[in-house]
Amino acid sequence: MSVKCHSLTPLTEQTALNYLAPKDVADRLGISQRSANALLRSGELETINVSVNPNSKKQRLRVTPEALEAFMRSRSVKPTNRKLDK
């Protein structure tokens, strides 16, 4: 029995550098890495699984800058005239 292997187009180094790890997401949002991981796992933030085996229990989730921007836009709020608590 012969098995055909199809190679995927390799990511360019520049493309790979654009993906954000959970720590990068946490840094950009000013939240803990634990909170960033929760956003990624909940699906609130669109992710890409870059694990060698996509069916692995251990996922390696990454976020594109565009997905992070879309998330931030979805969470934006309009300023109010109310005084903020200090």
Image: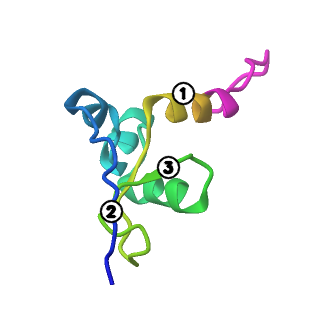
Mark 2 residue type: Ser
Asked which quadrant contains residue 43, the reply is bottom right
Colouring convention used in this rendered image of the protein: rainbow
Q: Is the C terminus in the top left, top right, bottom left or bottom right quadrant?
A: top right
> Between marks 2 and 1, how big is the CA–CA gap?
23 Å
Q: Residues within 10 Å of mark 3 (few under 14, many from 20)?
A: many
- Residue type of the residue flagged with mark 1: Glu
- Which of disc 1 and disc 2 is earlier in sequence? 2
Q: Mark 2 sits on what residue? A: 51
Find the magenta span and give its range. 73-86
Per the image, the residue denoted by label 1 is 69
Q: In percent of the image, x 58 and y 31: which residue is there? A: 72
Residue 10 falls inside the magenta stretch: no
Q: Which of these two is toward me, 11 or 30?
A: 11
- Which numbered disc, 3 or 1, marks the residue closer to the eye? 3
Give me the residue at 79% from left, 15% from top: 81
Q: Are marks 2 and 1 in contact (CB under 8 Å)?
A: no
Identified at 30% across, 52% down, the residue is: 7
Magenta residues, dominant SS class:
loop
Residue 16 seen from this side: yes
Does dot 2 land on a helix, a strand or a loop?
A: loop
Q: Nearer the viewer, mark 3 or mark 2?
A: 2
